[in-house]
Image (tube, rainbow, N blue to C red):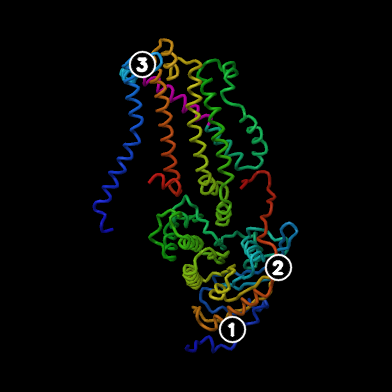
Amino acid sequence: MSKTSSSPSDAAWRARLHRGLAWLVPVLVLVAWELSARAGWLSSRVLPEPWAVITAFWALATSGELWTHVSVSTGRAFAGLAIGGGLGLALGLLTGTFRIAETLLDSTLQMVRNIPGLALIPLVILWFGIDEAAKLFLVAVGVFFPVYLNTFHGIRSVDRGLIEMARSYGLKGWSLYREVILPGALPSILVGLRFSLGLMWVLLIVAETISAQEGIGYMTMNAREFLQTDVVVVGILLYALLGKLADVLAKALERWWLRWHPGYRSAAA
Amino acid sequence: MHVTNELELPVFLDRTAADPVAAARVPIARSGAARGTEVWAQGLSKSYGGRQVLDRIDLRIAPGEFVAIVGRSGCGKSTLLRLVAGLERGDDGTVRLDGVPQGEAGADGTRIMFQDARLLPWKRVLDNISLGLSGPDARERAREALAQVGLAERAQEWPAVLSGGQRQRVALARALVHRPRLLLLDEPLGALDALTRIEMQQLIERLWREHGFTALLVTHDVAEAVALADRIVLIEEHRVAFDERVALPRPRARGASGFADIEARILERVLRQPAAQEAAPPQPLPQAPLWRFAI
C-alpha cells in the first residue's frame, strides 16, 4: 500500500491508451471511406461519403422529420413488445407454475414456435391488411417466444431447496410466489427480454419495409426511390442506435433487479 | 494433566436413556425448559421405492432436550428429521409434537436449519431474517436476532458476499427470530471448516441454553454430537441402535478425557457396522393435485 502514489495514475493512463487503441480501426475505416468517396473511387449511388450522411442526418433532424419517424418506429416496437412480451410472460408464468397449464398449453406453443414469424407475412397482410395492426402482430409474435420460453424455464429452475425452506417458514400462495419464485425466475426472464429486444427491431425493420406511411422503414424506402443513399444510411444507423439503446436499457434493468446476483454485480462494478 | 471433575462422575453414559419413556421423565435442570416442544415419534417407518429407510423408529424427546442423531450416510437420519419437520410424510407411525400429531397443528413452533444456509440471494441479510415475520416490530426483532449471532453490522449485505460460516449464522438467526420451541438442525455445520464449526457449535449451545428450545441435531460428526447433545441416538439398519445420555457438564471441553472417552466409544460403535450400501434416498415423486405450484 505504500508505493501506490505513481502506479494507479500510470495504470489509468495505460487503460485509457488501450481504450483509445480500440477506436483506432473504426476511425481509420471512416477516414479511408471519406477519402475514397472524395477521390471518386466510391460512387455515391453505392455508398455516400460519411460527411454526406452527417449532413443528411442534420437536415432531417432540423426539419423535425427525423423525430417523427423515430418516435413512430419506437412506439411500434415497444407496443409490439408490450403485447407479445406481456403475453409471453403471462403464459410462461402460467405454464411454469401450474402443471395442468403446462400439459394443456406447452406442446401447442412449442409447435407454433417452429413457425418463423416472417413466414407469416403473406397471411398477416391478408388478415390485417398493411395497417399498424399487421406490424404490431409481427413484432408481438416474434418477441413472444423468447419471453415465454425463458419465463417457463426460469420458474422451473428456481432452487427447490429455497422453496422448501420458505414453505417451512410459513410462506405459501402469493407470498411464496412474490418472495421466492418470481425473484428466482427473474434472471432467466430478463435473458428472454434481451433476446426479445434484439428480435423486436429485426421484425420491425421488415414490417416497416413492407409498407408504411411513417417510421424509419418508410423513410429509408422512400429515400431509396429517390436514390438518396445518404438518407438510407441514416436510417440503417438509426436502427442500429435504437437497438443499442434498447440493449443498454435491458442491461440497466438487469443491473438494478439483479444487483444481488454476484454475476451481474461484478459486471456493473 | 490435572484431574477434571468429569472423571469424578462414576458413569458418563446413562443407560436409562435407551428407554424413551424413562428418558422423557429425566428432569431437565434448565429454567427455559418449559419453552421446548416435546417430540414423540412412534413406530415411524418410511421407504422410498420399496427400499426401507426407517423401520418402526421410536423416539421421545423431552421439552428443552438437545438430542443428536448420528449414523453413517444413507442410514435415514436426515429422513427422520424431515419426518419430524413435516417436510415428508411417513408410511407408518406418528410424530406428535406436544401430544398433537404432526400436520394437525401449524408448524409455527418448529424451525429448520439445513446443511446449506438456503438464504434468499435476492434479499439482504436483514430481510432474509424477517422472512415470514409479520407485525410492526418485525425488523426490530430481526435486528436483535442478527445481533445475537454477532453479525449486526452485516444487516444490509447481500448473502452472496458472506462466508459459509456467516451464512449459517444468518440462517440460525432466521430460525431463532421466530422463537421456535423446536429447532431441527440437518447437518448445518457439515460444510464448514473445523474452526468455524467449533465456533458455531458454541454459538448454537449458548443460544439453546438461553432460549430453552428443544433441539434435534442430525450429524455425522461424533465429536459434534458429544459436544452439544444431552442424548446421542445412533440409527443403524433403519432402527435406533442405541440411545445414550451424555452426562458431561456444560460447557464441554473437547480436550477433557471424559469427552474423549465418550467420543471414542461412540465412534467405535458407529464403525462396527459396515457402511450402508446405498447412498442418500432418491426424492419421492410428488403426487400433485391438479392445481398447485409445480415446484
Q: Amino acid at mark 2?
A: His
Q: Is residue A67 magenta?
A: yes
Residue B252, visible in the rendered structure: no
Nearer-the-camera pick, A236 or B185: A236
Q: Residue at x 32, y 21 (%)?
A: A34
Residue at image coords 41%, 39%: A252
Dot 1 crowding, Cα within 10 Å, few <14, some 14–19, many 20+: some
* Circles 2 and 3 on the same chain: no
Q: Amino acid at mark 3?
A: Trp
Chain ID, mark 3: A
Residue at numbered disc 1: B12
SS class of the residue under badge 3? loop
Instruction: Look at the picture and state if A127 lies above or below A264.
Output: above
Vertical placement of B79 versus A139: above or below? below
Q: Main secondary structure of the magenta part?
A: helix
Please tell me in which quadrant of the rendered image residue A91 appears: top right
- The residue tagged 2 is B238
Label tally: 3
Query: Reading the chain from its start, which is encountered first: label 1 or label 2?
Result: 1
**Disc 1 with disc 3 on a shared chain:** no
Residue A49 visible in the displayed image:
yes
Q: Which residue is mark 3?
A: A41
Magenta segment, which residues?
Answer: A65-84
Q: What numbered label is drawn on residue A12?
A: none
Residue at mark 2: chain = B
Give the alpha-carbon distance from disc 1 to disc 2, as whole Å: 26 Å
